[in-house]
Amino acid sequence: MKLIIFLIFVLSIVIILPVYGIDLSALENVGLKQKYIIVFDGNEFELSIVANFPVISHAFSETEKSLTFNVETGKDSGNESEIYVPRGIYVEQPIVLLDGLVVSPTINENDNTFYIGMTIEGKGEHVIEIIDAENIDTESLEVSNGGGCLIATAAFGSEMAPQVQLLREIRDNTVLQTESGALFMTSFNQFYYSFSPVIADYERENYVFKEAVKLALTPLLTSLALLQYADIDSEAEMLGYGIGIIILNIGLYIVVPVVLIMKIRKRVNIEKLHRNHV
């Protein structure tokens, strides 16, 4: 009887689901949940990881409050994981490293758990580290050029959002392909990551602020989208397009608002003079 039920279940997946137009390829991203028990400060905590790739091994350092996962991804892209860490281990949001470089996954939290969602690009072995921010010197950490955009990710809700993907593609396929672009990204990351975590956290806490940031990012995304159509083959072209984009954004974010404010003030003053004469 059990064998018959099992065969019916298998046939329903292999035959019935495709007949009704259900894409079986979506099942590739379904991961298995693995649970681990770690001991910290004399107490046992259960953490879990859901991933569509295997976890080879894990380790926890109680003195440094650091978690390490050795994993092996099987796809060039779309290697997804969700890690659930008890708040009894970390009081504040931890820092996440991938292969020794700081990355910016999606981190949400409640009273009991930190949820860490991240996507790993590239097939092969990788090391995920989750470290207590209080126990390390953050200034000494190297930030990955492949890290995500914290502010945009928090605004649009996911690293897989089209707007975030656009920023990632422009960075990887255009800016980082030239030496001047790579130097710019290195300097920009040092400045950007000095304040972006605070803004991203506030976006998650305040819906109105999140929508305001989303609106404010729209002109920037529109201007950067122009780089997708640019044929950049030299350092000079990269500098030219880069300067052009900067000037365009100065106009969008500063010149246009100033002109509008001046016109509104002029209109208000004219109406006041008109009322005074009447």
Image: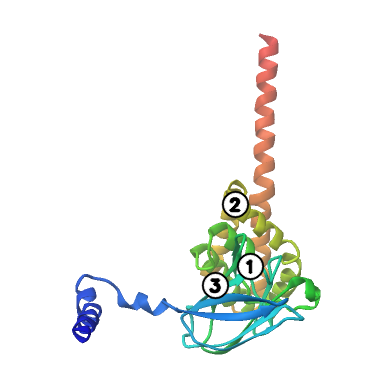
Query: Would you say 181 lies left or right of 78 here?
Result: right
Amino acid type of disc 1? Tyr
Rounded to the nearest angstrom, the CA distance separating label 2 from label 1 is 30 Å
Classify residue 88 by image quadrant.
bottom right
Nearer the viewer's eye, disc 2 or disc 1? Answer: 2
Badge 1 crowding class, 10 Å Cα cut-off, few under 14, some 14 to 19, many 20 or more, is: some
Residue at 70%, 17% (x, y): give it.
Answer: 273
Instruction: Name the quarter where the N terminus is drawn.
Output: bottom left
Disc 3: which residue:
169
- Residues 239 and 166: in front is 166
Q: First in sequence, mark 2 or 1: give its number.
A: 2
Disc 1: which residue:
241
Where in the figure is residue 212, as x and y percent of width and height? Answer: 60, 48
Rounded to the nearest angstrom, the CA distance separating label 3 from label 2 is 23 Å
Residue at 68%, 54% (x, y): give it.
Answer: 250
Q: First in sequence, mark 1 or 3: give its number.
A: 3
- Residues 72 and 190: in front is 72
Where in the figure is residue 221, as x and y percent of width and height? Answer: 57, 59
The circle on residue 210 is 2
Instruction: Name the quarter where the C terminus is drawn.
Output: top right
Amino acid type of disc 2? Lys
Nearer the viewer's eye, disc 1 or disc 3? Answer: 3
Q: First in sequence, mark 3 or 2: give its number.
A: 3
